[in-house]
Every structure is written in C-alpha cells, then in structure tokens.
Image: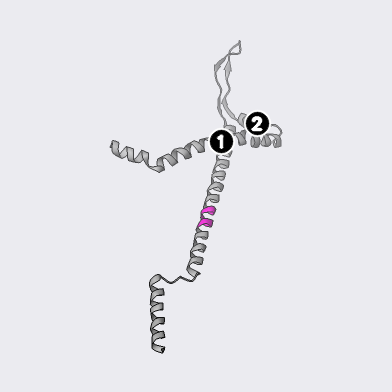
Amino acid sequence: MLKEFKEFAIKGNVIDMAVGVIIGGAFGKIVTSVVNDLIMPFFGFVTAGMDFKSLKWVLSPATLDEAGAVLKPEAAITYGNFLQNVIDFLIIAFSIFMFIKMINKMKDLATKKEEIAEEVAAEEPKEPTQEELLAEIRDLLKDNKATE
C-alpha cells in the first residue's frame, strides 16, 4: 500500500493538481477582491447606496437588556451575502471558462501548424536515396557502354 501511495504521489498529476489548487486559491482571492471592491460598490451606487452584505430577512430580532447587551442574537437569513457569493462564483466560473477556451484555441493553432508543416513536408519532392542514385548511375553507365 505504501508503494502504491508513493507511485501516486510522485506522479506528475498530483503535483499538477497541487499547483492548480494553489493557483486557484490565489485566483479566487483576486476575483473576490474584484467583486467586493469593484463590482459590489458599483451595484451599491446604482441601487442608491444599498450594501448587498447587509441585505437580510430577520426572522426574530435580537433581544437586548437595559444596558444594551445582547441577550439573544437575531435570527436572520442573510441573502445579500449569498447574492455576493453567487456573483463571486459566476465571475470565477466565467474567468476559468475563458481561460480554458484560450488554452484550447492555442492547442488547436499548434495542431494546425503541425498539420500544415506535415503537408508542406509531404509536398516537397523527396530526395533520392543513395541506393537509387547508384542504380541510376549504373543504368547510365550501361547505356553508355551499349551505345559505344
């Protein structure tokens, strides 16, 4: 079992996956920053200053004592935070889609270049081999002797 694990862990796929997870985490932070710092403030501006994170549906309000300390916290469904996370997901999914599409296009271009190179190589006249040249010289020498 240990041997199988070593083979699995040493394969390039696991390392590639680990690198992908690390880069994906960093990419997720960037997209979250874009959503939180650029997109959501714009939506807040368009919706007259509404902060999406503060959107909630209060099921039961908080109970406070005379000093203002919270006896029972409010129970609320924070759908604004959910909306923001959905927007995060959509932007990340769209970005990954565009990145994969770009990679596939680059792969297609590379394979087309290879196919064109193969076609050009096939169209070029094939040089005769050494044996063919020697046979041709022999035949010419025979013809020369026969005409003398």
Location of residue 44 in the rendering, given as x and y in whole percent from the top left corner: 68, 34
Q: Position of residue 69 (x, y in %)?
A: 58, 13
For label 2, the SS is: loop
Which label was assigned to residue 51?
2
Q: Residue at x 29, y 36 (%)?
A: 2
Three-letter residue code for mark 1 = Asn
Q: Is residue 145 above or below residue 95?
A: below
Residue identifier under label 1: 85
Locate residue 95: give its quadrant.
top right
Q: Which residues are magenta?
A: 105-110
Q: Image height check: is 139 above or below 40?
A: below
Quarter residue 132 falls in: bottom left
131 falls in the magenta region: no
> Taking the image as drawn, is residue 58 in sight?
yes
Q: Quadrant of the C terminus?
A: bottom left
| Residue 98 x/y as whole percent | 56, 48
The main secondary structure of the magenta stretch is: helix
Residue sitting at the far front: 148
